[in-house]
Image: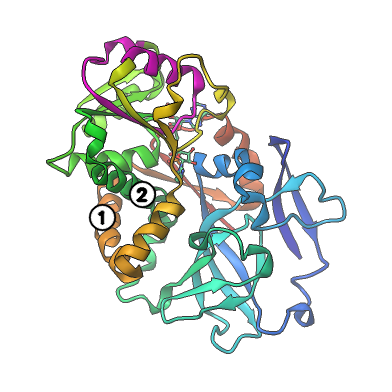
């Protein structure tokens, strides 16, 4: 039996658990060259909610089409996690192999391994061919030197977010910080923001940093001790608007960005739009300086750097950063275990509505 956690594409807070006995149980239904994996565990954060919010715009619904005769209008939010190969018609990828990568919140996934290398493979399923390569790549973790399953939870929770943090730091630095003397990070309590704060804090050449967060997360953000200054959404006027400023925005909050851009005026040198944690307030607010705003998509930056540095060069530069940030995150991150897809269905709305404590990291175990 296959079970899937599905959400309404036009009303993402509505979800259902779909069950079918049709495939997955039937060995013969596995195509030549394909493998079937059993999803074991995955993380779930605001990033996954953003996949749903931007599902039509950025193609996230296309990775794992929803099953069922009545699947019209339903979609599957991709998640980062681990899975084990339970059936295989592919000699290069035997049963028992363990993969890290992009999976559906579902019991199983059929994949078509391609470009199988020592540490990696690609899901060459036709419907994924035009989607960003980074999302189609899977890590054959048991072959990785020094692989330690004890780090799996942190890896699936932080890797997709902190790789983005690394890329943001890299892009800011590569552009001479856009001439900024301060970097403002909006929705500063998010894990992606905290990863960026680690990178900026560690770089002597980086400008000072200002965290903007909600009142309820202000103490947590201050306690991290990473940002030079922390203010709430209600107190933007406390920011020194005389300094040339770069903004890195994880919130997508049109009203907050409008106020911030208006406050900074000519000193708003660049606004990098990364996320949509405040997806319910994403209507563009008055005062947004669009000509100095840009959308940042981590897979595009990763692709660019992989071409310039080579995949191994990129892995070398990022892996020590990721190990360090994972280690540092242990000082505040509380992993919360969620029982199965039913548990995810129970807590899903809380994640959508931002009701979880900022120091929590959800790990769904199937
Ligand atoms: N463009 C890219 O390539 C890329 C890559 C990775 C991540 N991202 C984006 O970065 C963002 C952060 O993701 P994450 O997984 O790091 O987040 P997270 O750790 O789950 O963030 C939690 C924080 O987000 C805010 N929040 C979440 N839901 C909210 C809601 N409904 N209403 C108000 N505030 C809410 C709160 O922060 P505050 O109180 O501080 O606002 C909350 O503490 C996501 O939008 C994600 O998609 C983008």
| Residue pictured at 56% horizontal, 85% vertical | 94
Q: Up-down: is 76 above or below 250?
A: below
Would you say residue 330 is visible in this rendering? no
Residue 74 located within the stretch drawn in magenta: no
Quick check: is 239 in the magenta stretch?
yes
Q: Which residue is mark 2?
A: 162
Say if mark 2 contacts mark 1, CB within 8 Å. Answer: yes
Give the left or right position of residue 21, taking residue 202 as reference. Answer: right
Quarter holding residue 83: bottom right
Q: Which residues are magenta?
A: 235-264
Q: Quadrant of the C terminus?
A: bottom right
Of all residues, the one furthest to the bottom in this rendering is 91
Residues at marks 2 and 1, CA–CA distance in whole angstroms: 9 Å
Confirm if mark 2 falls within 8 A of ligand 1: no
Q: In this figure, which residue is indicated by the disc labeled 1? A: 321
* Image color mode: rainbow
Mark 2 is surrounded, within 10 Å at the Cα level, by few (under 14), some (14 to 19) or many (20 or more) other residues, namely many
Query: Does residue 268 sit above or below 44 in this rendering?
Result: above
- Residue 66 is situated, as x and y percent measured from the top left of the image, at 74, 54
Q: Position of residue 168 (x, y in %)?
A: 33, 44
Nearer the observer, 257 or 278 = 257
Question: In the rendered image, which quarter contains the N terminus?
Answer: bottom right
């Amino acid at each position: 039996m296959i079970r899937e956690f599905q959400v309404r594409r036009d009303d993402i807070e509505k979800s259902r658990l779909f069950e079918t006995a049709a495939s997955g149980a039937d060995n013969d239904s596995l195509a030549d060259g394909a493998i079937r994996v059993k999803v074991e565990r995955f993380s779930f954060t605001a990033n996954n909610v953003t996949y749903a919010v931007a599902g039509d715009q950025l193609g996230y619904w296309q990775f794992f089409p929803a099953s069922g005769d009545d699947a019209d209008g339903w979609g599957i939010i991709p998640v980062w996690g681990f899975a084990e190969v339970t059936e295989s018609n592919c000699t290069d990828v035997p049963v028992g192999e363990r993969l890290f990568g992009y999976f559906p919140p579902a019991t199983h996934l059929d994949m078509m391994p391609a470009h199988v290398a020592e540490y990696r493979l690609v899901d060459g399923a036709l419907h994924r061919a035009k989607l960003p390569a980074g999302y189609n790549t899977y890590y054959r973790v048991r072959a990785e030197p020094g692989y330690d399953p004890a780090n799996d939870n942190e890896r699936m929770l932080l890797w997709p977010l902190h790789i983005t943090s690394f890329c943001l730091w890299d892009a800011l630095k590569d552009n001479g910080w856009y001439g900024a003397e301060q970097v403002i990070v909006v929705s500063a309590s998010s894990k992606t923001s905290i990863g960026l704060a680690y990178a900026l804090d560690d770089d002597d050449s980086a400008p000072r940093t200002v965290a903007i967060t909600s009142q309820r997360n202000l103490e947590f953000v201050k306690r991290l001790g990473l940002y030079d200054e922390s203010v709430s959404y209600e107190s933007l006027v406390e920011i020194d608007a005389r300094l040339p400023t770069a903004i890195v925005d994880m919130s997508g909050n049109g009203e907050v960005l409008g106020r911030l851009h208006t406050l900074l005026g000519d000193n708003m040198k660049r606004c990098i739009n990364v996320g949509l944690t405040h997806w319910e307030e994403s209507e563009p607010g008055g005062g947004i300086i669009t000509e100095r705003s840009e959308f940042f998509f981590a897979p595009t930056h990763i692709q660019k750097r992989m071409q310039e540095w080579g995949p191994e060069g990129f892995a070398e530069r990022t892996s020590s950063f990721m190990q360090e940030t994972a280690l540092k995150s242990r000082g505040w991150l509380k992993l919360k275990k969620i029982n199965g897809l039913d548990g995810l269905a129970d807590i899903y709305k809380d994640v959508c509505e931002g009701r979880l404590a900022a120091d929590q990291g959800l790990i769904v175990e199937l």
